[in-house]
Image (cartoon, rainbow, N blue to C red):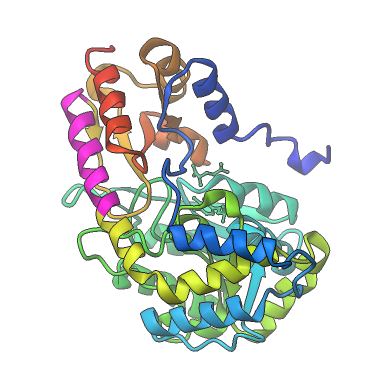
Amino acid sequence: LIERMRAYGETIFAEMTQLAVDTESVNLGQGFPDTDGPRTLLEAATRHILEGVNQYPPGPGRPELRRAVSRYRARHYGLDLDPDTEVYVTVGATAGIAASLLALVEPGDEVLVFEPMYDSYAAMISLAGGVRRSVTLRPDPASGRFTFDPADLRAAVGPRTRMVIVNSPHNPTGTVFTAEELEQVAQVCREHDLIALTDEVYEFLTFDGRPHVPLATLPGMRERTLSVSSVGKMFAVTAWKTGWVMGPEPLVRAVRTVNQFLTFSANGALQLAIADAIDHEGAWIEEQRTALQRKRDRLTEGLTRTGFDVSVCEGTYFLMADIRPLGYADGVTVARALPREAGVAAVPAQVFYDHQQEGAHLLRFAFCKQDAVLDEAVSRLTGWH
Ligand code: PMP
Ligand code: GLN
């Protein structure tokens, strides 16, 4: 293995899911729903396969999907994307993020990230030869939501800074960045001529009426932002691994140049089915949002009852729980012990940090599960410690 990838072993999701399986634990670790997306979507995919959509789709993606993506970004956010040159389909958001970093980060370039961060960012920045500068999100004393100090963001910018990665709604904190917070990022991008890469896979999973604001809608940002989203969380089909990169033509062309040699194209039958669902399953998306908001409340309430200090969650599948009120300090030790001792799996948030002590006392729990599963987890955790 090349030197710059040696720090990356097996992902925490693989490790914790295996531990959950081995111990027959309730798995609130890896974030995947335990009920699948709309029936029409599943049936359409089956139908397209049986009807012969089984050979390579165009590298940039089926035009039906690119057009549907362009339409929903216009409908929801007023964005205007040319489906032929400004939307590009990838094998999940993961490949979109990877191709974007490989296409735009030169060795030695610095990339700003907010920690805790989704695990693929660090690995792919390293693979591109880039250097991470992380800005820490911390709970705001007044509101309890994780946010950043704009001074930290400014202090992280240097002469080699090339890009900033923004994930909102944010995994693992559950923060949905406000327009004001995003404007702080936008100002830095404009002043220092940075490219922004946004990870918006949870764009339809915001709660309590909070809007999702794409960074690309802010002044001066459309021309410098690559936005990534995917079907996994939109329609609760995380195995479908179909995503899309959106942005100005020159940036999308760069991604395309790289991605044609990474995966060449994604699954064609699924793309056709997804295009149709994006156009017609808006009501399902809203039902999913409402259901997840209730699940957030259910798990927040349950974990609070068992003694965790649960932080404010505004979106995504995840919430963060502080173990210190239970008398513990090291989340990695607790997360490794919990499956065997309590029969519940969670993810130690420390793995999402560069400054690991910042997240040492936090566990990430996924609430995208059936109510009975959430209740079982809470009941197993009651009196565990
Ligand atoms: N970004 C974030 C923040 C995620 O949580 C995930 C996991 N679903 C991904 C990207 C990867 O998405 P996909 O499965 O579409 O590759
Ligand atoms: N996105 C999911 C999570 O954050 C799963 C990611 C993965 O398994 N790579 O838990």
- Residue 311 lies within the magenta run: no
- The total of numbered circles placed on residues is 0
Residue at coordinates 44% horizontally, 22% vertically from top-left? Answer: 335
Q: Which picture quadrant has residue 260?
A: bottom right
Residue at coordinates 49% horizontally, 80% vertically from top-left? Answer: 190
- Residue 292 lies within the magenta run: yes
Q: Nearer the viewer, residue 230 or 181?
A: 230
Asked whether, in this view, residue 97 is left or right of residue 353, the answer is right
Residue at coordinates 65% horizontally, 74% vertically from top-left? Answer: 88
Tell me the quadrant of the picture where the N terminus can be found.
top right
Q: Nearer the viewer, residue 9 or 69?
A: 69
What kind of secondary structure does the magenta stretch mostly adopt?
Answer: helix
Tell me the quadrant of the picture where the C terminus can be found.
top left
- Point out residue 116 in the picture as x, y percentages from the top left corner: 45, 45
Relative to 363, does residue 94 appear above or below in the rendering? below
Asked whether, in this view, residue 1 is left or right of residue 161, the answer is right
- Point out residue 306 in the picture as x, y percentages from the top left corner: 20, 23
Q: Which residues are magenta?
A: 291-307
Whether residue 61 appears in this view of the structure is: yes
Residue at coordinates 46% horizontally, 34% vertically from top-left? Answer: 350
Whether residue 157 appears in this view of the structure is: no
- Point out residue 331 in the picture as x, y percentages from the top left corner: 41, 25
